[in-house]
């Protein structure tokens, strides 16, 4: 059996007629950039989240950059974000003129550690970008309290967390601005790049819409950038949006089956869903001391896995100038050497899940003991 990491084609086939019709309509109207479909999606997404405004843009990375500029980031301002994320979260801080300050993460949720945020705040700190990594919300109540106490803004990076909830409230509704990606593989994905910013602040929304469209159409009140959602992507997102709750439930079902079947296998630690946080399982990430050998074993069995991400951000060459050492981020470093993302997508059948579990079980049951170690590796220091 071959198990892909995600199967976008299976999802297309499940709603083929609607997608084909949506695409044909855009072509019939030649509404390729912005237009009716884009406006409809902006309204539908704002309504889904229960926020005042949604401003679409070209991708989830631009969304963070646009939000940072809207919040008035100035040269040298420090912005605190997670050491364990995709680089969009930090590269945009630098692009907007700020200084990246990395924080360690919480061991069980992979999200930013609020205690470390407090330690990293200086007089030049202006904001925090928590990431709802893998689909699990960061600890927003505590983060918002810290932000309030120190007069900082918050941008929620929701790229992996469409419809995730924290104490019953949707992520994207806590910060001053929240950003989403609709990259094809995300929980709500277009057939190309797309993204948006959402906010309840009309003034910020107006500024972001103007900035993302060359500083205004007809009257350039400022120099902006060109970051637009195209009509085809919006039409596809409009067609897919009604299915997002069911797809989210299906992801949770896959995760629940993995949880139940992997609970007792080898030294595998299944993702911890913390109370009060509704995980939407963009990724299903287990931890094991035997990650690399297990990954090889699964690959030989036809199962694709991914490392999200191979290293903590501060240890990529792009950030060598910060001069960090592993003990600066002990939890992120420890986790990052043990994480393995297993295949998960709404269309994944139980026989596929069971095959993945069987192969993981096989690795721990039948491989020579020398292939894997049962002792805890020493934490990075
Ligand atoms: C995907 C992703 C982004 C960026 O989204 P793009 O649409 O690919 O630019 C930002 N942050 C995180 C955490 C992501 O996973």
Image (spheres, rainbow, N blue to C red):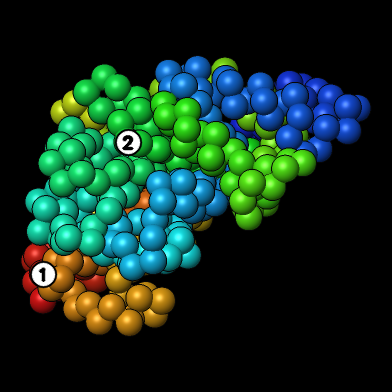
Residue extending farthest to the right is 28
Seen from the viewer's position, the closer of residues 77 and 264 is 77
Residue 23 position by quadrant: top right
Picture coordinates of residue 206, whole percent (x, y) = 55, 34
Dot 1: within a 10 Å radius of its alpha carbon, few (fewer than 14), some, or many (20 or more) residues?
few
As displayed, is residue 381 above or below residue 28?
Answer: below
As displayed, is residue 22 above or below residue 187?
Answer: above
Picture coordinates of residue 351, whole percent (x, y) = 45, 34
Q: Secondary structure at mark 1?
A: loop
Seen from the viewer's position, the closer of residues 207 and 154 is 207
Which residue is at a point 75% across and 24% down the rendered structure image? 36
Q: How many marks?
A: 2
Which residue is at a point 47% across and 28% down the rendered structure image? 202
Query: Earlier along the polypeptide chain: callout 2 or callout 1?
Result: 2
Which residue is at a point 24% across and 46% down the rendered structure image? 152
Q: Which residue does the numbered mark 1 point to in the structure image? A: 379
Q: CA distance from mark 2 to mark 1?
A: 33 Å
As displayed, is residue 286 above or below residue 246?
Answer: below
Which residue is at a point 16% across and 61% down the rendered structure image? 122
- Residue 289 seen by the camera: no
Q: Which residue does the numbered mark 2 point to in the structure image? A: 175
Picture coordinates of residue 147, whole percent (x, y) = 20, 42
- Residue 330 seen by the camera: yes
Disc assigned to residue 234: none
Seen from the viewer's position, the closer of residues 7 and 104 is 104
The quarter of the rendered structure image containing the C terminus is bottom left
């Amino acid at each position: 059996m071959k198990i892909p990491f995600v199967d976008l084609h299976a999802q297309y086939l499940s709603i083929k007629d609607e997608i084909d019709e949506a695409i044909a309509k855009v072509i019939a109207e030649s509404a390729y950039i912005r237009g009716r479909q884009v406006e409809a999606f902006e309204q539908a997404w704002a309504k889904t989240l229960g926020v005042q405004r949604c401003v679409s843009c070209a991708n989830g990375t631009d969304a963070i950059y646009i939000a940072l500029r809207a919040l008035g980031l100035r040269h040298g301002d420090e912005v605190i974000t997670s050491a364990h994320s995709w680089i969009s979260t930090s590269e945009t801080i630098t692009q907007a003129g700020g200084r990246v300050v990395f924080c360690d993460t919480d061991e069980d949720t992979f999200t930013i550690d609020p205690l470390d945020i407090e330690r990293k705040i200086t007089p030049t700190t202006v904001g925090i970008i928590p990431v709802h990594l893998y689909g699990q919300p960061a600890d927003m109540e505590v983060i918002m309290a810290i932000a309030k106490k120190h007069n900082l803004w918050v941008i929620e990076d929701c790229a992996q967390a469409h419809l995730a909830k924290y104490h019953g409230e949707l992520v994207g509704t806590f910060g001053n601005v929240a950003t989403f990606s609709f990259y094809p593989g995300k929980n709500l994905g277009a057939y190309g790049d797309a993204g948006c910013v959402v906010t309840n602040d009309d003034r910020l929304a107006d500024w972001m819409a103007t900035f993302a469209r060359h500083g205004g159409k007809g009257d350039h009140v400022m120099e902006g950038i060109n970051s637009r959602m195209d009509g085809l992507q919006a039409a596809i997102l409009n067609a897919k949006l009604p299915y997002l709750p069911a797809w989210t439930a299906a992801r949770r079902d896959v995760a629940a089956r993995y949880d139940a079947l992997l609970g007792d296998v080898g030294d595998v630690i299944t993702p911890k869903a913390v109370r009060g946080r509704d995980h939407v399982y963009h990724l299903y990430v287990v931890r094991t001391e035997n990650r690399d050998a297990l990954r090889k074993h699964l690959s030989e069995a036809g199962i694709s896995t991914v490392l999200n991400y191979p290293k903590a951000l501060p240890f990529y060459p792009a950030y060598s100038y910060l001069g960090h050492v592993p003990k600066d981020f002990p939890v992120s470093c420890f986790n990052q050497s043990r994480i393995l993302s297993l295949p998960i997508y709404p269309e994944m059948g139980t026989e596929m899940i069971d095959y993945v579990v069987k192969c993981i079980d096989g690795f721990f049951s039948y491989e020579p003991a020398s292939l894997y170690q049962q002792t805890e590796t020493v934490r990075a220091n």
